[in-house]
Amino acid sequence: MNFQREWRYGVIKFSDANAALTEGEREQLAILMEKVACHRIEQGKAPLECVVVESDWSIYDATWAAVEQMASASN
């Protein structure tokens, strides 16, 4: 089975949100993020912790290669 990249997570950089959203919109976003985080806990899941590597970072391709290697080893 070949590794396929998936769109599984949505990421908003806080500096982008601060620049693009009004104070009220940022408050709404924070409320929604907290609601989703609480839902995870209610479902017995651990808090979601992730590492984000932006595409213009020098380690981006190496990071994807490491993810692919790990996923392939799991199958």
Image (cartoon, helix red, strand yellow):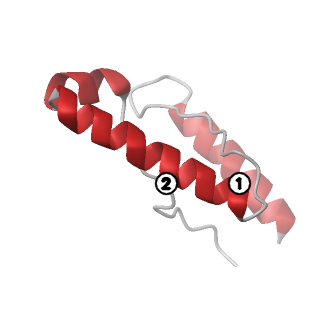
Q: Is residue 47 above or below residue 72?
A: above
Q: Position of residue 4 (x, y in %)?
A: 56, 68
Q: Which quadrant does the N terminus fall into?
A: bottom right
Give me the disc on residue 9.
Answer: 2
Q: Nearer the viewer, residue 8 or 25?
A: 25
Q: Is residue 11 visible?
A: no
Element carrying mark 1: helix
Please name the amino acid that badge 1 sits on: Ile
- Residue at 71% x, 54% y is 41
Q: Is residue 52 left or right of residue 2?
A: left
Give me the disc on residue 63.
Answer: none
Which of marks 1 and 2 precedes in the sequence?
2
- Residue at 18% x, 22% y is 19
Q: Is residue 5 left or right of residue 74?
A: left
Please name the amino acid that badge 2 sits on: Tyr
Residue that carries the numbered disc 1 in the rendered image: 41
Q: Nearer the viewer, residue 36 or 74?
A: 36
Q: Is residue 23 above or below residue 28?
A: above
Q: Position of residue 27 (x, y in %)?
A: 30, 34
- Residue at 39% x, 37% y is 30
Quarter of the rendering containing residue 47:
top right
Q: Position of residue 63 (x, y in %)?
A: 62, 37
Q: Is residue 45 above or below residue 48?
A: below
Q: Which quadrant does the C terminus fall into?
A: bottom right
Separation of disc 2 and disc 1 at Cα?
18 Å
Q: Nearer the viewer, residue 18 or 66?
A: 18
Q: Is residue 47 left or right of residue 5?
A: right
- Residue at 29% x, 42% y is 28
Q: Nearer the viewer, mark 2 or mark 1?
A: 1
Q: Position of residue 64 (x, y in %)?
A: 59, 45
Q: Is residue 32 left or right of residue 28?
A: right
The mark total stands at 2
